[in-house]
Image (cartoon, coloured by chain):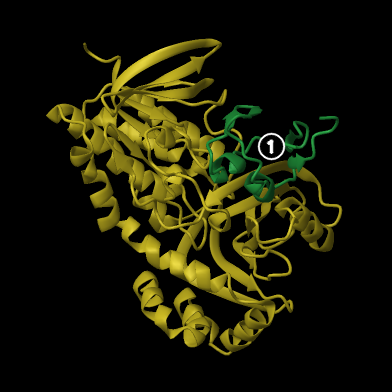
Chain colours: A green, B yellow
Amino acid sequence: MMKKMNHNQDRCDFCGVCVGVCPHDAIELREAELIIIDDRCTRCGQCVQACPIHALEVNDEAGL
Amino acid sequence: MKPDYDVIVVGGGPAGSTAARFAAGRGASVALFEKDREIGVPVRCAEGVSHAGLAAVVETIPPRWIAQKITGAVLHAPSGAEVPLFTDQTGYILHRKIFDYDLAQMAAAAGVAIFTRANVSGLIMEGGCAAGVEVDHLGRRRRISARVVIAADGVESRVARWAGLSTRTALNDMESCAQVTIGDYKGDPEMLHFFFARSMAPGGYLWIFPKGSGMANIGIGIAAGSAGGESPHNYLEAFLDRFFHGAPILGRVCGGVPCSNTLKEIVTDGLMVTGDAAHQANPLTGGGITLGMMAGRIAGETAAEAVAAGRCDRGQLRRYSRLWLEGEGGKQAQFYRLRKFVFSLDDEDYDALAGSVLRIPAEKRTILSILKSALLRKPSLLLDAVKLFT
């Protein structure tokens, strides 16, 4: 079962730390929008560890 | 076919604006793309610079840039012991918003075309050479061609990755940061404060940088991944609760600083990387404003020279990496080794160190003398410290 990336728009400060540590170039940051490029993301969780404010999580995907 | 511009700069921070200004100053046509709607905003920075560092990259320092003059610092050990440090080196806390605006305006005055809300979403490659960017500007995607692209796109850099350079920051080299600006700050406005404790800021430190008018930037950086799931935000909340309970919080921001050595390759065909994107901040302190400007200047001048020479391959652009390494960039490896050492200490080490440093008379207490005391246990780094701080 592929895990799912969760991004909390309301906590996120759009600072780009997650983009900087992503080994797979799988995150795109716009001014106030964060896009996880699903087919590149391996759910390695490094962005989750680096986020200054817990705006990212790797979760089990419900119902699949 | 003639490209749209000689040089495209991606990112309107201090490194990007400076690169753009110096490229235009040497005759290149230059466009600068900033993804956010406004230059200099949000300010993801503690805003501290040394006078010497700033004076090395600008001809004059207008008073409107300066929020607060700094004359000393206090280092705090985990036990609560305080080590005052006075230096003859003046520092400043900047108004980064005004500062960044002015740097962009200086670039514009040199002829740079500045575009905000211009998100670069792709790199155009021709025959293996960077040849322009795809940019979303005000809802329209356009392809803009250029002879040289300068990636000054910060900690979130992707542009250089698209040209095949590895700009990724290893988890432990990323200082993950959170900061608030508080009002009602009652401390000495000319003194910085640094708190070193693994229990309060693992792999980094907490800072208090007074901003004048009763305000202060209070923030924290921790080595990403070192805190076992705790975020810098949570550590900062605990610190504020303990020392600034009830203080009004006027601003809140997150950010990060790549604190490694400079990237192995900051140049490829048709492209240079500069500033935080190139990991050019000081890996020990995380300070990157003036270093980014220094590097940006070299990159901008190199771009203009390459355009004039009609050659934008990596061999031509290597002037930039060579001059960076001959100057400030040459110190990065030593600062990185010191970073590794300083943040490997545990709380008992910091307390013991504070004890021995307090026995040094205040007037002789310099950063070098402190490092010398610390490095008694790691003499192999003494030479690095002496080179960097004398």
Relative to A41, say whether B90 is above or below. below
Residue B21 or residue B177, whichever sits in front: B177
- Chain that bears disc 1: A
Residue drawn at point x = 38 percent, y = 70 percent = B388
Quadrant location, the C terminus of chain B: bottom left
- Callout 1 crowding tier (Cα within 10 Å): few <14, some 14–19, many ≥20: many
Q: Is residue B98 visible?
A: yes
Question: Mark 1 belongs to which amino acid?
Answer: Asp
Relative to B176, say whether B78 is above or below. below
Residue drawn at point x = 67 percent, y = 65 percent = B202
Dividing the picture into quadrants, the one containing residue B166 is top left
Residue B192 or residue B334, whichever sits in front: B334
* Label 1: which secondary element: loop
Dividing the picture into quadrants, the one containing residue B310 is top left
The number of callouts visible is 1
Relative to B307, say whether B50 is above or below. below
Where in the figure is residue B207, as x and y percent of width and height?
A: 64, 60
Residue B93 or residue B389, whichever sits in front: B389
In the image: residue B344, left or right of residue B13: right
Where in the figure is residue B378, as x and y percent of width and height?
A: 47, 83
Q: Is residue B58 visible?
A: no
Residue drawn at point x = 39 percent, y = 58 percent = B52
Dividing the picture into quadrants, the one containing residue B350 is bottom right
User: Which residue is situated farthest in the left direction here?
Assistant: B309
Residue with the mark numbered 1: A13
Quadrant location, the N terminus of chain B: top left
Residue drawn at point x = 45 percent, y = 52 percent = B281
Where in the figure is residue A37, as x and y percent of width and height?
A: 60, 29
